[in-house]
């Protein structure tokens, strides 16, 4: 049991190092030697835990999606209404702790691996389903089920699209800009009369304030790096 625990810790450390390597060098220039150098171990140690580079990339891909999931869970703790839970999903996906130019560029590199790596495909399918399910759970409070399903799918596509664009553009896409773009899409797809608009505005403001404290805290940043 003890050795298994140590192995899990080492794999997590190497996954973090591999993710940092992709952030620094891009996917094509990430090598097992560079991962080992960042982790402070030899290439042999990396190979001991990940028999091939594709397995390591799958772990990195899994980690990048886990960071997004943990951000949503953290904000859910403070969301009390469907409006606030919807905005918790949106804000979590674009908060600066994980939504920044370096990470977005790394994510674009990782996404390019999906068509060629069955493990990465499984992770991405699961991630897409998680986002769809989270959105669907809240959207059903605003729309009939069939329509909510379509809107959930479209919002997921917009989230991915903003991430891809942020990873490709030479200038960074700020969190507030990304969230405002999602607000525009929401205003076109959901009921957005005067009362609803005010509730969305209040929910966004509350969740953004909480995110600055919860996701911007040293404790959460340290958790992200674990």
Image (tube, helix red, strand yellow):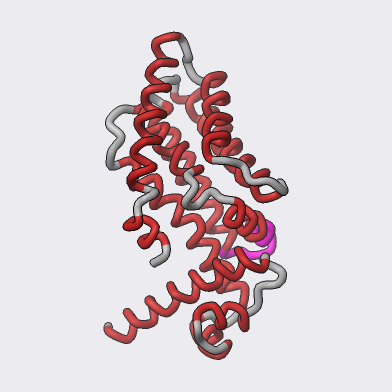
- Classify 126 as above or below 193: below
Which residue sits furthest top? 194
> Horizontal and vertical percent for residue 29?
70, 72
- Left or right: residue 52 versus residue 214 is right
Q: Nearer the viewer, residue 58 or 93?
A: 93
Residue drawn at (57%, 56%) of the image: 103
- The stretch in magenta equals 112-119
Q: Is residue 122 visible?
A: yes
Magenta-colored stretch includes residue 208:
no
- Which residue is more in the foreground, 125 or 56? 56
Task: Determine the image quadrant of residue 197.
Answer: top left
Identify whether 131 is placed above or below 194.
below
Residue 69 image position (x, y, % from top left): 42, 50
Residue 80 sits in quarter: top left
What is the quadrant of the C terminus in the image? Answer: bottom left
Q: Up-down: is 166 above or below 200?
A: below
The kind of secondary structure the magenta stretch mainly shows is helix
Visible residue check, residue 153: no
* Quadrant, the N terminus: bottom left
Q: Is residue 136 left or right of 118 when viewed as pictured?
A: left
Residue sitting at x 67%, y 59%: 109
Q: Residue at x 34, y 44 (%)?
A: 213
* x, y percent for residue 49: 49, 82
In front: 62, or 68? 68
Residue shown at the point (55%, 71%) measured from the top left: 18
Tally of numbered tags: 0
Rendering coords of residue 35 (x, y %) = 57, 78
């Amino acid at each position: 049991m003890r050795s298994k625990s140590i192995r899990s810790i080492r794999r997590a450390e190497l996954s973090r190092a591999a993710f940092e390597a992709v952030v620094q060098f891009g996917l094509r220039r990430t090598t097992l030697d560079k991962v080992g150098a960042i982790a402070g171990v030899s290439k042999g140690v990396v190979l001991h835990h990940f028999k091939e580079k594709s397995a390591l990339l799958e772990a990195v891909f899994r980690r990048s999606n886990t960071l997004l999931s943990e951000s949503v869970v953290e904000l859910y703790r403070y969301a009390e209404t469907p409006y606030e839970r919807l905005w918790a999903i949106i804000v979590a996906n674009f908060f600066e702790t994980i939504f920044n130019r370096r990470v977005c560029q790394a994510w674009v590199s990782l996404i390019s691996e999906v068509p060629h790596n069955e493990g990465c495909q499984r992770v991405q399918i699961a991630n897409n389903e998680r986002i769809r399910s989270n959105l669907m759970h809240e959207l059903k409070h605003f729309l009939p089920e069939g329509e909510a399903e379509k809107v959930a799918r479209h919002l997921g596509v917009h989230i991915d699209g903003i991430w891809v664009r942020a990873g490709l553009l030479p200038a960074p896409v700020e969190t507030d800009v990304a969230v405002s773009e999602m607000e525009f899409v929401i205003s076109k797809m959901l009921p957005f009369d005067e009362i609803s608009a005010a509730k969305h505005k209040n929910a966004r403001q509350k969740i953004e304030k909480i995110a600055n404290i919860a996701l911007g805290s040293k404790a959460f940043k340290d958790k992200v790096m674990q």
